[in-house]
Image (cartoon, rainbow, N blue to C red):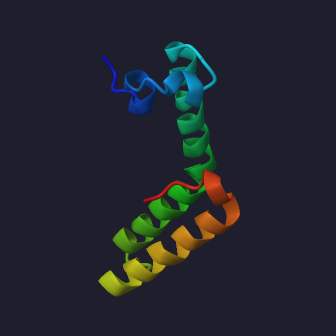
Amino acid sequence: MRPSVLPFAATSKLSAFAFGAMPPVLTQSMADTIKITMNLLGLPFDIVRAQYARAVQLGLIERSMLGSRDFSRTLEALEQLSLGPWARHV
């Protein structure tokens, strides 16, 4: 059995009130849809991360932990800025 994305909805007596008396199947379906949407919106940023890693492997960019940290922070800030609440929290 898959773990529920929203465990509160399945175990709480307030779940009918909090989720407008939606059936658990619909709640899970909505949670899955949100997860898929967030992954699709984050795909361009994943591609940039992969290209950066490949450039480091090929020697086009110097191997540096500090440089990698700065790149990751900059890319995460761009993702947060462009996607807002839809951005993933890495």
Tell me which residue sits at (52%, 54%) in the image: 88
Q: Quadrant of residue 30?
A: top right
**Viewer-proximal residue, 15 or 38?**
15
Left or right, 19 with respect to 73, comes to: right
Residue at the spot 40% in from the left edge and 66% down from the top edge: 53
Can see residue 84?
A: yes
Q: Which residue is at the front of the view, 77 or 26?
A: 26
What residue lies at 53% left-to-right and 29% top-to-bottom? 32
Q: Which residue is drawn at 38% across and 73% down?
A: 56
Tell me if 75 is positioned left or right of 41 in this view: left
x and y, in percent, of residue 55 in the image:
44, 71
Q: State whether residue 62 is above or below residue 6.
A: below
Above or below — where is 19 with respect to 44?
above
Q: In this view, does 64 lie to the left or right of 26?
A: left
Q: Position of residue 67 (x, y in %)?
A: 40, 84
Image quarter in which the N terminus is found: top left
User: Is 71 displayed left or right of 33 in the figure?
Assistant: left
